[in-house]
Image (tube, rainbow, N blue to C red):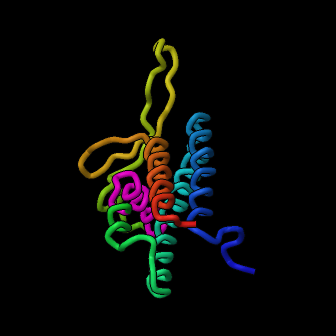
Amino acid sequence: MPLAFGKSSPRDMLAKAKRDLARLRAAEASEDGVATGDALMDVAIALDSARLWLNGYHKRAVKAGSSPFTKAALAVLESALELSSYTNIANEYKHSGASRDASTSEVLLSVPSSHFSRDDSASFSRLKVTRSDLSRHRATDLAAQGIQTMESFMDKHSVV
């Protein structure tokens, strides 16, 4: 039995990222901090894993004689703000320790940010990602953009 049960392609990982994003949205809406952190980790790891699987896909295709995309095209994909953000978040989750702070090369932190409803009567929390250029992005929006960017890349290059 394969170790990656039920996952055998970059598209499988992308489908997992979509399910994880749905869980992140639900957890954020419920204001459950533990569930939000778990779902953020899952989205980040799934998106980064899909990126890594594309690297492997490319290497295997080159060895077989033809790759549907170039290493340069993959580098452009990996540098997209939404994907590089989630790669940094995934690396923080995977490699964090007592000697590390909450910053990586591109993402400074991901924290809840409170907002008020239209009638100012109730507040709700949104998870924000702050990058090293101090731009702030809603975590769920970045994930959705990352999924769309990766899906478009796979469609363009006929990745199964």
Magenta highlight on residue 136: no
Name the chief secondary structure element in magenta: helix
Image spot of residue 122 (x, y percent): 52, 19
Magenta highlight on residue 86: yes
Quadrant in the picture for residue 31: top right
Q: Which residue in the rendered view is the most extreme toward the left? A: 133
Q: In this view, does 100 lie to the left or right of 56?
A: left
Image quadrant in which the N terminus is located: bottom right
Label tally = 0
Q: Which residue is drawn at 42% across and 35% down?
A: 113
Quadrant in the picture for residue 76: bottom left
Q: Residue at x 53, y 56 (%)?
A: 41
Image spot of residue 56 (x, y percent): 49, 77
The answer to whether 71 is drawn above or below residue 62 in the figure is above
Q: Which residue is drawn at 59% across and 47% down?
A: 34
Q: Which residue is drawn at 52% across and 64% down?
A: 158
Which residues, given as a range, are shown in magenta?
78-96
Image spot of residue 115 (x, y percent): 43, 26
Q: Which residue in the rendered view is the most extreme toward the top? A: 119
Image quadrant in which the C terminus is located: bottom right
Of residue 102 and residue 46, the one placed in the foreground of this image is 46
Image spot of residue 39 (x, y percent): 58, 51
Of residue 120 and residue 75, the one placed in the foreground of this image is 75
Q: Is residue 90 left or right of residue 13?
A: left
